Image (tube, grey):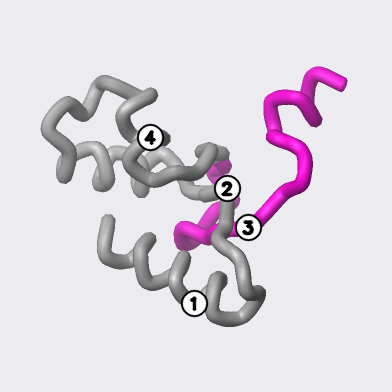
Amino acid sequence: MLSFIYNVSQQFEKEHGYSPNTLCMNYAHLECLKQQLDNPNDFEAVTSLLGMELVISQDAVNPSVAWFSEPWKQAVNS
């Protein structure tokens, strides 16, 4: 899972000229990712490792990345 996310992120950066700041995935993807980590229950460690905010959506068929000018937490609470 980490290698897939890395490849998607690299492709995004190559196409846009800047790194993504948001990763969208479903719960199954998240569980697969967590299995590759030392402390899978530390959600903060997951986002810190990725360097992106995480958006969980059951509609996400594959993990995808994007760049948003406003952090999603602020956008939702606005």
Quarter of the view holding residue 41 = top left
- Residue highlighted by disc 2: 22
Closer to the chain start, of discs 2 and 4, is: 2
Three-letter amino acid code at the position of disc 1: Gln
**Reading the chain from its start, which is encountered first: label 1 or label 2?**
1
Element assignment for label 2: strand
Instruction: Say which mark, if any, is on residue 11.
Output: 1
| Residue in the picture at 24% in, 37% down | 34
Say which of marks 3 and 4 sits in front: 4
Confirm or deny contact between disc 2 and disc 4 (CB under 8 A).
no
Q: Position of residue 44 (x, y in %)?
A: 38, 24
74 falls in the magenta region: yes
Residue that carries the numbered disc 4 in the rendered image: 48
**Residue at the image position 28 percent from the left and 21 percent from the top:** 42
CB under 8 Å between discs 3 and 2? yes
Where in the figure is residue 39, as x and y percent of width and height? Answer: 17, 26
Pointer 4 local density, CA inside 10 Å: few below 14, some 14–19, many at least 20: few
Sequence-earlier tag: 3 or 4: 4
Q: Which mark is residue 66?
A: 3
Amino acid type at image mark 2: Thr
Does 2 lie within the magenta span? no
Q: Residue furthest right?
A: 78
Q: Which secondary structure lies at badge 4?
A: helix
Which residue is painted at 21% across and 29% down in the image?
40
Q: Is residue 49 visible?
A: yes
Looking at the image, tell me whether mark 1 or mark 4 is earlier in sequence order.
1
Q: Residues within 10 Å of mark 2 (few under 14, many from 20)?
A: many
Report the side of 51 relative to 15 (left or right).
left
Q: In the shown orientation, is residue 57 left or right of residue 38? A: right
